């Protein structure tokens, strides 16, 4: 296929470069041509009147790549060519390789044309990668490397030996006209290599997994990270696709909650000697985290949440008296969750001048014992055995306000008050008191008669 020629000066320069390339040995593996499309399509031309240049696209999943060429125009005879000829040596081994992707029914082809230095076709066309069973025209029975039309990228190579004397080749590709409707041929990393085919393909279009499970689509390489949020632990900083440890607090400025660089390389909330970040409700630094409380600092735990749960490092209410055992002066657990001086069931702290428990305020007090309503089954205003309490004159006894003293109907006894005395009787104690009371009244009456 004829294309417009360069000027004689351009052709001469290209020929000099080509001859220089031939001076080196072709037996050693060296790359003569490599297209990764990052610089655009400037090195390529399309067949006359065949339509627009193949489009360039990028792909990040499932295989990692940067830019690649997508050919949707179906054609025969070769549609996209390198603009210039690539110098090769006759009777020498070369390898053509490329990443190729197509879906079922797609028939992409990659090959070479024998050409002149300007890229004008002068000889045989050799398809090297394409439909299974297609001849390469390099020796009898030599077949192309077959494409795989499963929608995945595949690295395909074909070794060949040039014929004749020194010559030039152009690299060509097309999406053959026999391809199924709606399919496309996609090509990347097209390489012409002197010597044997590479043992491993370029990194692009390989599935990213393991430690480098992310795709940098701008470079077509699998990396460990693309940004700071992709790294954690002792290597929280993303540096050129690699997760590394922090070197100072400034390396941790990407995360508002983890602004301190620890000696391990991790970005943490706080550390020994760096506790200023812990403020407000989480003012305690524990295990490099800002928490409400810890086993060594429970100063935030007060009121109805006096206990520090060291599992969650939060303050909570008490569940039983044993939770309050370590609090001097407040050994009892109230129903509100607070540790208090006393409760109806725990008056161990009430002694000396304050032997009684006011269960309304959970505090120890002096004077009359204030009973918990209903705990002894009766009324706490006066206690007896069911009979009236008599006064000094043999009549019914009265309270300070003139009311009649009534016996306690409870089974556990009650409080006897009068003369500033405060005491609590036990069950059945009233029967023991009455004889003494009668004896006292007898001696009082006798004394009056003597007067």
Image (cartoon, grey):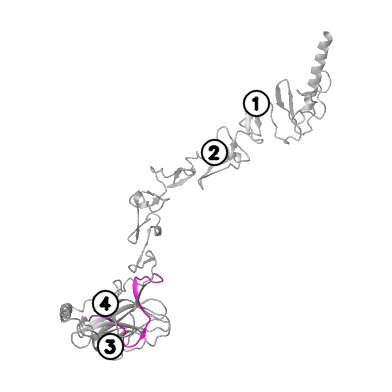
- Which of the two discs, 4 and 1, labels the residue nearer the N terminus? 4
Q: Is residue 188 left or right of residue 425?
A: left
Tell me the crowding category of disc 4: few under 14, some 14 to 19, or many 20 or more residues within 10 angstroms, Cα based: few
In this rendering, the label closer to the viewer, 2 or 4: 4
Q: Quadrant of residue 82?
A: bottom left
Q: Which residues are magenta?
A: 60-84
- Which of the two discs, 2 and 1, labels the residue nearer the N terminus? 2
Magenta highlight on residue 64:
yes
Q: Quadrant of residue 410?
A: top right
Question: Which residue is under mark 4?
Answer: 43
Say which element carries label 3: strand
Magenta highlight on residue 72:
yes
Question: Which residue is under mark 3?
Answer: 125
Residue 124 visible in image? yes
Say which element carries label 2: loop
Question: Which residue is under mark 1?
Answer: 366
Outermost bottom residue: 140
Question: Which residue is under mark 2?
Answer: 302
Say which element carries label 1: loop
- Cα–Cα gap, marks 4 and 3: 19 Å
In this rendering, the label closer to the viewer, 4 or 3: 4
Percent coordinates x, y for residue 193 in the rendering: 25, 78
Cβ–Cβ below 8 Å for labels 4 and 1?
no
Percent coordinates x, y for residue 326 in the rendering: 54, 36
- Which of the two discs, 2 and 4, labels the residue nearer the N terminus? 4
Q: What secondary structure is the stretch in magenta mostly built from?
A: loop
- Cα–Cα gap, marks 2 and 4: 77 Å
- Cα–Cα gap, marks 3 and 1: 115 Å
Percent coordinates x, y for residue 177 in the rendering: 37, 87
Q: Is residue 221 above or below residue 50?
A: above
Q: Is residue 325 left or right of residue 112?
A: right
- Cα–Cα gap, marks 2 and 3: 89 Å
């Amino acid at each position: 296929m004829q294309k417009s020629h360069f000027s004689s000066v351009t052709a001469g320069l290209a020929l000099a470069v080509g001859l220089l390339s031939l001076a080196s040995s072709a037996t050693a593996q060296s790359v003569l041509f490599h297209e990764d499309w990052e610089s655009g399509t400037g090195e390529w031309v399309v067949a006359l009147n065949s339509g627009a240049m193949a489009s360039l696209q990028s792909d990040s999943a499932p295989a990692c790549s940067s830019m690649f060429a997508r050919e949707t125009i179906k054609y025969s005879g070769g549609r996209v060519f390198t603009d210039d000829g690539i110098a090769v040596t006759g009777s020498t081994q070369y390898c053509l390789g490329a990443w190729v992707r197509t879906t079922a029914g797609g028939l992409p082809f990659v090959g070479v044309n024998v050409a002149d230095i300007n890229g004008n076709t002068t000889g045989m066309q050799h398809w090297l990668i394409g439909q299974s069973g297609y001849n390469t025209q390099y020796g009898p029975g030599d077949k192309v490397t077959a494409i795989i039309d499963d929608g995945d990228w595949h690295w395909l190579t074909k070794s060949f030996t040039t014929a004749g004397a020194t010559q030039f080749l152009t690299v060509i590709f097309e999406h053959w006209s026999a391809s199924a409707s709606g399919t496309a041929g996609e090509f990347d990393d097209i390489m012409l290599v002197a010597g044997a085919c590479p043992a491993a393909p370029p990194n692009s279009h390989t599935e990213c997994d393991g430690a480098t499970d992310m795709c940098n689509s701008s470079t077509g390489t699998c990396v460990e990270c693309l940004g700071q949020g992709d790294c954690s632990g002792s290597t929280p900083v993303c540096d050129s696709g690699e997760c590394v440890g922090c070197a100072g607090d400034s390396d941790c400025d990407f995360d508002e909650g983890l602004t301190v660089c620890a000696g391990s390389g991790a970005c943490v909330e706080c550390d020994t000697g760096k506790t200023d970040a812990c403020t407000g409700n989480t003012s305690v630094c524990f295990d490099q985290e800002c928490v409400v409380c810890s086993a060594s600092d429970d100063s935030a735990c007060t009121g109805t949440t006096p206990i520090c749960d060291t599992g969650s490092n939060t303050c909570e209410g008490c569940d039983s008296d044993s939770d309050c055992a370590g609090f001097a002066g407040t050994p009892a657990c109230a129903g509100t969750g607070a540790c208090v001086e006393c409760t109806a069931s725990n008056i161990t702290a009430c002694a000396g001048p304050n032997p009684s428990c006011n269960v309304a305020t959970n505090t120890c007090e002096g004077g009359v014992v204030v009973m918990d309503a209903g705990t002894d089954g009766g009324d706490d205003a006066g206690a007896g055995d069911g009979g009236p309490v008599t006064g000094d004159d043999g009549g019914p006894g009265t309270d300070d306000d003139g009311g009649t003293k009534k016996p306690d109907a409870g089974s556990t006894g009650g409080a006897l008050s009068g003369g500033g005395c405060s005491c609590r009787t036990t069950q059945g104690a009233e029967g023991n008191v009455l004889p003494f009371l009668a004896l006292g009244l007898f001696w009082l009456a006798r004394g009056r008669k003597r007067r």
